[in-house]
Image (tube, helix red, strand yellow):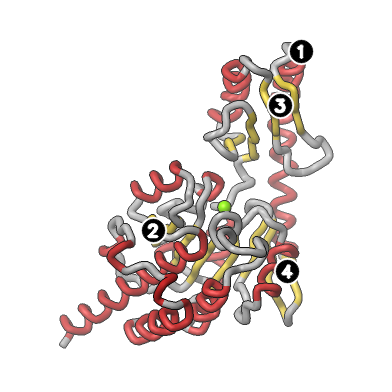
Amino acid sequence: MGAASAGLLGFLHRGTGSNSLPSPSATRRHGIQEKMVRPRLLIFDFDGTALGGHEPYAQFPEPFVHFLDGLAGHGMQWVTNTTWSPEMQWEVIRRSGVRSTPAFLTGQTGRVLASVVEGKLVFDEEFAQLIAEKDRAFRERVWPRVRNLFITMLQHDLVNRLAFDFYAPQCVIDFTCNEGCEEEVWQLVRPLLDAGDYYVFNPAQRTSGMLLPAHMNKGDIVRVVQNRLDILPEETIVAGDASNDLHMFDPSLCGWMICPTNAEPIVKDHISRHGGIIATQPYSWGVIEGIESILRHCSKAAESEKRVKL
Ligand SMILES: [Mg+2]
């Protein structure tokens, strides 16, 4: 690892230019010094993480493209984890000029799993069936309660917008409260949240709300990917910026957590409490900064270990 990461760091410094890279000391570290396992997998979000701070928006910045290819060249696999469909992701990846191939593309908030075979996107049917079965069981379980909730909301004129597509498998609830009704609406939906059936997509929102089914999250699919690739959580780096990334920022799913400086406060707080890295750079520059910090740490740990053995 020592030689590999030192080589990669050298490559990255050359590839991205010294002005775009933070000094190692600028990175806020939280407990990563204790970790000695070499990372083998990077899982990252799109909006606000890999994408942002760059035009065109739907294209990775050049330093990130080189970085991904550099990681792949040194044996680290990478996987996407976003709300985007795998088709749109693959389009972004190809348009950006990334030469390496993602081990998996996961999309639609953990609902879709795809990989690239001979340059073509292939969807995982087994996983699709698993999600379809979860959708079916979920709808059967919650629909009577959700239906009553909707009737109450509408009868009491509590919302001016209520979206729920009965024929879509997602069962997402999306609403905007009438002025002054926010408290009542959130109290009404609270039992769905307390029972663990739904979670709030963006807890910072108050007037409007989007509730996602518990099984539609970015965390469960991390474990699926790790099992398929035979990679341990402690060998996994996760990078994201928003509250919908919190499911993948689970200490039982990853050895390292990274967020760029533009991350939501709730994410920074979580990362801080769980020994992750809050980068000083935004978007993909922050991801690069965080991973460089981890690799630098691993190189030092490997060198220390070698010295102890000698
Ligand atoms: Mg995001």
- Find the distance from the CA under tag 4 to the CA under tag 3: 37 Å
Dot placed on the residue nearer the N-terminal end, 1 or 2:
1
Most foreground residue, 245 or 233:
245
How much space separates mark 1 and mark 2, taking CA atoms? 49 Å
Per the model, the C-alpha gap separating discs 2 and 4 is 29 Å
Cα separation, mark 2 vs mark 3, equals 42 Å
Residue indicated by mark 1: 155
x, y percent for residue 80: 60, 64
Query: Badge 2, how many Cα within 10 Å: few under 14, some, many 20+?
Result: many
Work out whether mark 2 precedes mark 3 in sequence or the reverse, and give the earlier one.
3
- Give the residue at x 68% y 19%: 178
The answer to whether residue 30 is above or below residue 170 is below
Disc 2: which residue: 280
Of 156 and 232, the residue lying toward us: 156
- Residue kind at label 4, given as amino acid type: Glu
Mark 2 / mark 4, whichever is N-terminal: 4
Q: Nearer the viewer, mark 4 or mark 3?
A: 4
Classify 269 as above or below 228: above
Would residue 104 be found to the left or right of residue 242 on screen?
right
SS at circle 1: helix
- Around disc 1, counting alpha carbons within 10 Å, would you say few (fewer than 14), some (14 to 19), or many (20 or more)? few
Q: Is residue 38 left or right of residue 145?
A: left
Q: Which residue is mark 3?
A: 146
Q: Residues within 10 Å of mark 4 (few under 14, many from 20)?
A: few
Q: Spatial distance from mark 1 to mark 3, Cα to Cα? A: 14 Å
Residue that mark 4 sits on: 91
**Residue 61 on image: x %, y %:** 58, 69
Label 4 CB, ligand 1: below 8 Å?
no
Q: Is residue 228 visible?
A: no
Q: Of the residues shown, which amino acid type is indicated by label 3?
A: Val
Q: Quadrant of the C terminus?
A: bottom left
